[in-house]
Amino acid sequence: MKYMFIILLLLFTCRLSVAQVTDDNWTVFRGKSDLSGSTRAELPDSPVLLWKVTSDVRTKSSPVISDGIVYFGNDKGTLYAVSSEGKVKWKFETGSPIEAPPLVFGDKVFAGSSDGVLRAVNKLTGKLEWSYYTENQIVGSANVWISGKQAGIIFGSYDYYLHCADPASGKPLWRLETMNYVNGTPSVSNNKIIFGGCDGIIRVADPRTGTERDNYEIGVYIAASPAVVNEKAYFGDYDGTFYCVNMQEGRIDWMIKPGETSGAILGIPAVISNSVVIGNEDKYLYCYNATDGRSVWKYRTNGRITGSAVVTPTKVLFGSMDGNIYILGLANGKKQWGFNAGAPISSSPAVSQGRFYFLTEDGRLLAFGVK
């Protein structure tokens, strides 16, 4: 009985530390709050385009899903809620571009915008619940930290701060000051917040107080976010160097320096089992061994890769600025399926119930699955 109690307690603790995703939901940008971009649910072998919704306005955001409803924003500042049949349920106008992917938590959708405001909107009605004001633009998605009855909505701003707001009221809980823009989405894992910024530092913070626990000086802009799995943070920098930081040991386990043709790493790695997948502005998608950084394969597209991939136990799903969506084999990097979307794709996919969703930069939401 004693051992059973310990096991149940450990399972409960893990559940509190990371916001989990069911097969129905992709409520957090990158699927889970650790930003690992992975799902155990498999993708269809031969997906087809099921429907599309056109907003007629450029978008650089990415979709999220809650209870079958897809949420996304565009450069006009419109936040959309779209049903699983492709019908627009509601629209909310912020008046400022929404580049940051939304977050769904509880009964609210949270979306940051270029006017520096994080807005909480009722996910069923599209009515504004509250607004939180920062002093500069918000381009990265918010994330959520949960522990028992405590929760916080965590997000960065170009005002140099990482912010935490109460999800019910929008009241500030704490702020952590950095030395430059906080561009990406903070990762939440094992009761820690891990994030980078344009000051070239990966910081580890206490989610309850915002106190900085640790930091790792990289010295180069970190435009995206770390994916955190098993106390290891995987991320790239603006020069194209790719890192694995062992937070338990307080050291860099390995790093892959950029080649002569390498570009910036603007996406977030996707991590599953012992594989880590990342795109680069040099048009390649790379797969590395997560333990030692050994190269497993690389796949060349005809455009820059600025979004992030999603990985399943056997497949890799991603888009490219060449306008194509790809599914590759995780083991060998061989192309298994493709779709020409007709416009550049900087979006990261959302995956739910055998379907996946992408945004094109010309403002279309595309839904794929099996008829």
Image (tube, rainbow, N blue to C red):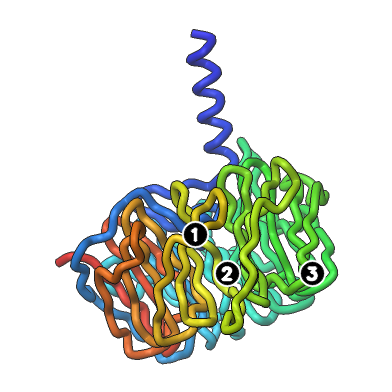
Q: Real-space Cα distance between discs 2 and 1?
A: 33 Å
Residue 103 position in % (x across, y down): 53, 62
- Picture coordinates of residue 227, whole percent (x, y): 57, 57
Q: Is residue 107 above or below residue 78?
A: above
Say if 161 sits above or below 319 in the image: above
Q: Could you tell me how far apart the alpha carbons at marks 3 and 1 are, in whole angstroms?
A: 23 Å
First of labels 2, 3 by sequence position = 2
Residue 210 in percent (x, y) is at 79, 51
Q: Residue at x 35, y 70 (%)?
A: 357
Classed neighbour count for the residue bearing mark 2: other residues with Cα under 10 Å, few (<14), some (14–19), many (≥20): many
Tell me, for residue 111, which label it has, or none: 2
**Residue kind at label 2, given as amino acid type:** Ala
First in sequence: mark 3 vs mark 1: 3
Instruction: Residue under label 1, please give it.
Output: 288
Q: Mark 3: few, some, or many residues within 10 Å (few <14, many ≥20)?
A: few
SS under mark 1: strand
Q: Is 212 positioned to the left or the right of 185 in the image?
A: right
Q: CA distance from mark 2 to mark 3?
A: 30 Å
Mark 3: secondary structure: loop
Residue under label 3, please give it.
219
Answer left or right for 240 relative to 353.
right
> What amino acid type should be assigned to the residue bearing mark 1?
Tyr
Query: In the displayed image of the protein, which residue is found farthest to the top?
Result: 1
- Residue at coordinates 76% horizontally, 53% vertically from top-left? 173
- Badge 1: residue crowd in 10 Å (few <14, some 14–19, many ≥20): some
Q: Is residue 287 above or below residue 16?
A: below
| Amino acid at circle 3 | Gly
